[in-house]
Image (cartoon, rainbow, N blue to C red):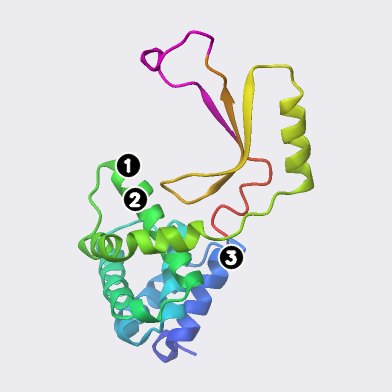
Amino acid sequence: ATAGEFKTQEVANLFWALATMDEKADPCLLEAMQRRARLTAGNFNSQEVSNMLWALAVMGEVYDEVLGVLINLFSARVLELRDQLSLAEKSQIHQWLLSCELDLESSGVPLPSGVARVKLVLGEECLQAFSGQASHESGLQREVAVALRGAGMELEIEEEHRDARSGYSIDVLVRRRPAEGSTESDGPAPLWAVEVDGPSHFLG
């Protein structure tokens, strides 16, 4: 089949598969599929559009003018489908929004207008959907936490700490207990994030 014959589900499935398998696709194939996605963006259903945005985030596609057109089209489609989005789809959209913030805002590049609109309208809702997912600690993680607690240092150990901004859970958050007599003016206590089972599940 040629790119012009691909249905929306097939386009979304292709991008999702490439992202899941961490495969680098031929640039000509990606260009053809992105062009097909632009032409059919208004026909994507909620699962397809959330899969596409999640895949673009995972694949780390370089933002340029061409991709910007696609992103704005999908942003508009997300808002059209907002009442149909499942919790899983909202979680994917949150990961995409977070990826946009980290990749663009950290470089001093403003969010595209479509992305900024999705963040304004759905950002908090999608964050709550993502944060509400149950986290599961592994046996290895528990062993690491026990070892840290038994290290004899003045440490506070918190397992499965949920980061307020990203919604991700940190396997083990380690804080050094403030020294006796210290005050807030002395600054915050040092923090260390210990990720035992990552990074494969960061964008899973």
Badge 2 amino acid: Glu
Classify 142 as above or below 75.
above
Q: Which residue is mark 3?
A: 20
Badge 3 amino acid: Thr
Mark earlier in primary sequence (3, 2): 3
Single out the residue that lies furthest toward the left: 113
Q: Main secondary structure of the magenta part?
A: loop
Q: Which residue is mark 1?
A: 106
As for residue 187 lying within the magenta part, the answer is yes
Q: CA distance from mark 2 to mark 1?
A: 7 Å
Q: Quadrant of residue 75?
A: bottom left
The residue sitting at 56% across, 61% down in the picture is 133
**SS class, disc 2:** helix
Q: Nearer the viewer, residue 65 or 84?
A: 84
Circles 2 and 1 in contact, beta carbons < 8 Å: yes
Q: Which residue is mark 2?
A: 101
The image shows a total of numbered marks equal to: 3
Q: Position of residue 98 (x, y in %)?
A: 39, 53
Q: Nearer the viewer, residue 137 or 100?
A: 137
Q: Nearer the viewer, residue 21 or 130?
A: 130
Mark earlier in primary sequence (2, 1): 2
Q: Position of residue 122 (x, y in %)?
A: 32, 65
Q: Which residues are magenta?
A: 179-193
Mark 1, Cα crowd under 10 Å, few <14 / some 14-19 / many 20+, is few
Badge 1 amino acid: Ser
